[in-house]
Every structure is written in C-alpha cells, then in structure tokens.
Image (cartoon, rainbow, N blue to C red):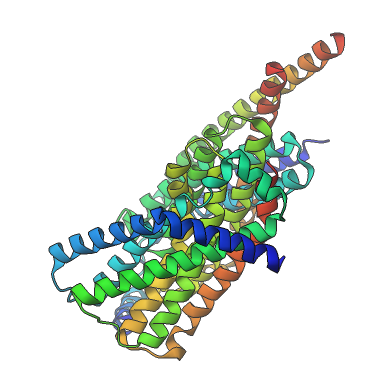
Amino acid sequence: MRNWWKALAVILLLFTLIGGFLIEVPKQVILYESIRNLYFHVPMWFSMILLFFVSTIYSVKNLSSGKIVDDTKAVELVNTGIVFGILGTITGSIWAKFTWGAWWTNDVKLNGSAITMLIYLAYMVLRGSMDDEQKRARISAVYNIFAFVLLIVFIGILPRMTDSLHPGNGGNPGFNNYDLDNNMKLVFYPAVIGWVLLGFWIANIRIRLNKIKQQLIY
Amino acid sequence: MKFVLGIILSFLSFLTQAQPIEMADQMRASGKIYVVVAVLVTILVGLIIFLITIDRKVKRIEQELKQSNASK
Amino acid sequence: MLNEITTLLKKDFTSEFRQKATLNGILLYVASTVFIAYQVFNAIEELTTWIALFWIILVFASTNASINSFKAESSQAYYYYYSLCSASSIIFSKLIFNASLLLVTAGLTFGLFVLLMGNPIENSILFSLVLLLGILAIASTLTLVSAIASKTNNNSTLTAILSFPILLPVLLTAIKASVLCGLGFGWEDCVVYVSTLGLLNLLTIALSYVLFPYLWRS
C-alpha cells in the first residue's frame, strides 16, 4: 500500500469534522462555540509552514544536485502552501471579527502571516522573471532558503518580545488552558496531521502534473 | 494597560462563574447539530472523492506517457 | 582571501569616487525626502513618528543605494576579473562596500533629521549601536538580494519586491529598540532587541557566505 498516507488523511479529516463538532469543549466567554475553529484554522498554518519547510529542503537538494525535479517539487510545495496560507488568513480574519471585534488586528502573528505571504508571492514573481530553467531553479532556490530562514527567525523570535492576542503569549483570556483539556487535544492533534497530509496530497498531484507537462514539452 | 486588562478579565471570569456560559446547547439538544455535521461530512467526502479521481487521472496519464515514451 | 577583498574594495571605492553616481543619488534622495517630511511635519513632537519616519526613509535610501551594486558585474569584462578571485571574497567585499555606503547614508539622514526636526533621542550611545547593527543587517540582506535580482531581467523592481518582506524583521526590531533608546531606557531594557539584531546579522552574513557561490556559478 503506497498510498496509505492518503487514506490516513481521509480518516483523520473525517474524524476531525465529526469529533470537532460533537465532542465536548471547555465552556468559555468570548469564544463560546467558536473555540472549535481551533481544529480548522490553526492546522492551516501548520500545513503552510510544513509545506514551505519541505520546499526549502528541496531547494537545498536542488543546489547540491542541480536536478530540475527538486526545483519542481519546491515550487509546487510553495504553490500549495500559499493556498493554505490564504485560507488561514481568511479564516483567521473571520474568527478575529467575532472574538476580538476587528477583521485585522495589529498582532504579531497576523503580521507574521502577512509577511509570509508577501515573501512567497515575491518568490513566485522572482521565478516569473527568468526563462532559463537551470538558472531559475538555482536562483529561486537561493532566495527560498534565505527567505525561509529569516521567516523562521521572525515568527520564532518577535512574538516572544511583544504581547499578542493569540493564546500562549500576552494576556489573552482565550484558551490559555486549551492544551490542558484532553478532549480538545484528542481532536486537535489528529486534525493537524490530517490537514497537513491533505496539503501534501494536493502538492503531490501538482508535482506529478508539472512533471507530465515538462515531459510533453520536450 | 496589562493590569487593567487583568482586572477586567478577573471580573469577567467572576461573572461567568455566577451564570452558566451559553453555548450552542440548544442545537445539541434538538439534534440540529447533527444536520450541520452531516452536511459538512458530505462536502468533505465529495471533495475527497473528487481529489481521488484527479489522482487516478494523473496516474493514468503518467502511465500513458511512459508507454508512449517507451514505444518511441 | 584578505588580499582579494582589499583589492576588490579598492576597485569599488575608486570607481565610486570617480563617478560619485550612487553617492550623489542617495544624497539627493535623502535630502529631498527629509525636506518633504520637514515641510509636512515641521518639528515632530512625537518620538514614534520621528523614529518610524527615520527608518522608513533610511530603508528606501538603502534599497536605492544597493539596487545597482551588482550592475557593473554583469558585463563581460567583469566576468574575467572575477574569474580571478573566489566567490566568497566577492560577496564580502560587496558587503563591506554596501555597509560603508549605507553607514554614510545613515549618518547623513540622522544629521538632516536632527538639523531640521530636532533630536528626541535621549540615549544616543545605545541608539548609535542600534543604528550600526540595523544598518549592517539591512546592508547584508540587500547585498544578497541585489545579487539575486541582478541575475534576472528586471533587477531594479525585483530588488524592492524581494527585499522588503525579508527586511521587515530587521526593521521592526530596530524601530522598537530605537523607540526604547529615544525614551532613555538603558542597556538592560534593550538587550533583547540588540541581541536579536546581532543574531539577524550573523544569520544573513552566514547565509550570504554559503549561498552566494551558487548564484555566482550561474
């Protein structure tokens, strides 16, 4: 069974939907039932970062091997990651409107996500400005690695220095104790794995399509 | 700023202890939440079946391409 | 390697002094933007506005200054010159050149700001340290990014697009630290930001050193 992980993704996502709506959650003001968004909004970011991380690994591989295959993988992983990032931004915006009262708040995590999107859109622009395949692969790989490392520094360090509305940093009533609640853990971890796997599945299909396209051209 | 927030929050939590927090219990009691879950599961299953068919199609094209390359 | 760096630096500096194209451009740019800011604000009462404006003008001036740092290198003659020395000495010489250019720019901008809009900075020793580290980080980021952009078809727009999102961490940290310096806070309160800037410097320089050879080969 080579596609076991796709089956796992389906099972975990079904469990996320059913368990996410039916299993008891802690009762809290401000959040109310919207706490269940945790199973759907947060995994978007996990998937995005993981897709970008694996893309960076393939960029490193491309620099050391010089193979176009690695570049194809890197760019399609980024493409899928951008979709997940956009979904994460929109869902976060909706959730913020109904809990914090504004579509966009000047929060480190939100700014971090905005910068992430800008970086990877810039990556796509950079790719669009070169025609030669080998050159495009190498130069965009250099930018991908450089940008990802700085991005990790940004989202790893800056939130620690400032207050955030997000749980875990700053004085947010939200769900500082959500990770203590076993019921939520039971759904949250499978949800993250399920969404991440779905992301890689879509990326996998895009990579294969891209390879077919390349074969047809030559 | 943080201090004031803290006071407000402790006040809020005091309030919430006094009266039960209103969740969507009504929906659960009347069984309507199952309708929502059913709709969402249908959408998810539909999308996944769609994804699987796309996956299959790509695989078929990959094999055709391999054969045509071999016969060349 | 040290020999190569000094030779390359000498070449860059003499050509800069002979033409003075970059320096004059920056001079005019900084003077006109600061003058416009002065016309709009007269004396800036609020510290945050002063500092934000200062850094924004500085970043745009730096981007303008670094856009052309690899422009001359794309001609055939330079390929020959540079085949004589290693990639790492090229990137280091460019880095030092850009950093010194930007330090001059920073000093100039600061002087004009103080002259026209007053000096609200209370802890000026610490502020100069923050300024130095911030400029170094900006210079090293811009050097690599302009090297990337020089390999593409439209390099001037791309430098801006590629660098702004990854300059944001540096910029935000530098602005936060400068505000603290401006309010007169001491070393203990700023040490987090100063060390973050130092870390960003180390990272960008190390990444430039590792990644530049791959750019150079193409």
Residue C104 in view, yes or no = yes
Q: Residue B50: image x %, image y %?
A: 60, 26
With respect to residue A158, does C83 lie above or below? above
Please report the residue visible at 41 percent of the width from the left and 85 percent of the height from the top: C126
User: For the image shown, how many numbered marks are present on the structure?
Assistant: 0
Residue C150 position by quadrant: top right
In the displayed structure image, the side of residue A122 where residue A19 appears, left or right: right
Tell which residue pokes out farthest to the top in this image. Answer: B72
Residue A9 position by quadrant: top right
Q: Nearer the viewer, residue A41 or A132?
A: A132
Q: Residue A207: image x %, image y %?
A: 67, 32
Tell which residue pokes out farthest to the right in this image. Answer: B70
With respect to residue A66, does A39 lie above or below? below
Q: Residue A50: image x %, image y %?
A: 63, 51
With respect to residue A131, does C109 lie above or below? below
Please report the residue visible at 56 percent of the width from the left and 38 percent of the height from the top: A79
With respect to residue C132, does A183 lie above or below? above
Residue A161 in view, yes or no = no
Q: Residue A107: image x %, image y %?
A: 38, 64
Q: Nearer the viewer, residue C206 or C13?
A: C13
Q: Looking at the rendering, in which quadrant would you find the C terminus of chain A?
A: top right
Please report the residue visible at 68 percent of the width from the left and 44 percent of the height from the top: C80
Q: Looking at the rendering, in which quadrant would you find the N terminus of chain A?
A: top right
Residue B8 position by quadrant: bottom left
Tell which residue pokes out farthest to the front in this image. Answer: C18
In the displayed structure image, the side of residue A59 where residue A80 appears, left or right: left
